[in-house]
Image (cartoon, grey):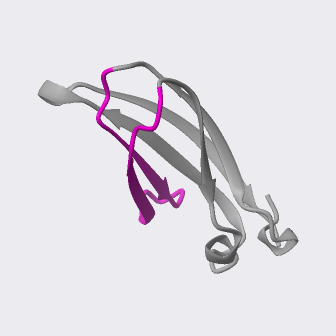
Amino acid sequence: YNPKAGYPLSIEYDIAEGYDSIEFSMYTMGNRLIKRVSSPVLAAGKNRLMIDAAWLATVSNGTYFYVIEAKGPAGRARSKNGMVMIIK
């Protein structure tokens, strides 16, 4: 991904019904948290998370991993992990 292109980073994910919120966390390869965003669930099924290119332009070149976690009532949670490479 090249943030200098000006386009936001788009990450697609699927969720089932019954979850209250989504939390996106981005980490360095050394497990240091660099970004956390929470939002309510909009709809069951496919959803898309957009990360602003201006913020990503402040991140150094490298490989990062992310976790998208859906949280629900009674402590239920589901997560998706992935990686993104920033090259400017």
Residue 56 position, x and y percent, is 65, 70
Q: Nearer the viewer, residue 35 or 19?
A: 19
Q: Quadrant of the N terminus?
A: bottom right
Q: Nearer the viewer, residue 87 or 48?
A: 48
Residue 20 position, x and y percent, is 29, 35
Q: Within the image, what quadrant is residue 82 found in? A: top right
Q: Nearer the viewer, residue 87 or 29?
A: 87
Work out which residue is located at the far left of the displayed protein and give it: 74
* Above or below: residue 81 compared with residue 7: above
Q: Is residue 72 left or right of residue 43?
A: left
| 69 part of magenta stretch | no
Residue 6 position, x and y percent, is 81, 71
Work out which residue is located at the far right of the displayed protein and give it: 5
* Above or below: residue 20 compared with residue 78: below
Q: Is residue 17 left or right of residue 3?
A: left
Work out which residue is located at the far front of the displayed protein and give it: 43
Q: Nearer the viewer, residue 8 or 80?
A: 8
The segment highlighted magenta reads 18-43
Residue 72 position, x and y percent, is 25, 30
Q: Residue at x 68, y 77 (%)?
A: 54
